[in-house]
Image: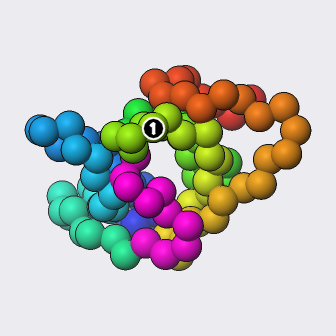
Amino acid sequence: APDEMGGWSMVLFGGTDARHDPLSDMWLYHPTRGTWTPVRQTGSAPPHGLAAASTAKLRRDTVAVYGGFDSRRFSGTLRLLDLRTFCWRDVAVTDHVPRPRTHAACGIV
């Protein structure tokens, strides 16, 4: 997500804490200020947090998130995050769906 100075920002989502419990919070890092800001998410965010998911930036304002682990199960869900609104949406995939997974590499080609 671009920051207000025209530079770059970093979005942090999910992961696990020291007890390996999943986290579902989101933060935005502003490098020009050296600060973190909590982000309010809307839409179909992963319900129990997510760790070790694969991510790839699709466009300037969209990140794809696939798979991961929510402390109960491996995920096989593909979600898109709009970086302008921080709204999640599920992507319906109907044919040849990969098995649920975690710790997978992902990139745009």
Q: Residue furthest front?
A: 72
Q: Residue furthest left?
A: 18
Q: Residue at x 43, y 72 (%)?
A: 41
Q: How is the image coloured?
A: rainbow
Whether 104 is among the magenta residues is no
Q: Is residue 84 above or below residue 7?
A: below
Q: Secondary structure at mark 1?
A: loop
Q: Residue furthest right?
A: 95
Q: Percent from the top left, x then y, of residue 24?
A: 33, 57
Q: Magenta region, mostly helix, strand or loop?
A: loop
Residue 106 in view in this figure: yes
Judge from the rendering whether residue 72 lies leftward or rightward of residue 108; answer left or right: left
Residue 61 in view in this figure: no
Query: What stretch of residues is rendered in magenta?
Result: 41-50
Q: Percent from the top left, x then y, of residue 89?
A: 63, 65
Of 16 and 28, nearer the camera is 16
Label 1 is placed on what type of residue? Arg
Q: Percent from the top left, x then y, of residue 106?
A: 59, 29
Q: Residues within 10 Å of mark 1 (few under 14, many from 20)?
A: few
Label 1, on which residue?
73
Q: Residue at x 53, y 24 (%)?
A: 104
Looking at the rendered structure, the number of numbered marks drawn on it comes to 1
Of 30 and 46, nearer the camera is 46
Q: Residue at x 37, y 75 (%)?
A: 40
Q: Percent from the top left, x then y, of residue 23?
A: 28, 52
The quarter of the rendered structure image containing the C terminus is top right
Q: Residue at x 49, y 70 (%)?
A: 86
Judge from the rendering whether residue 73 lies leftward or rightward of residue 32; answer left or right: right
Whether 47 is among the magenta residues is yes
Quarter location, residue 100:
top right
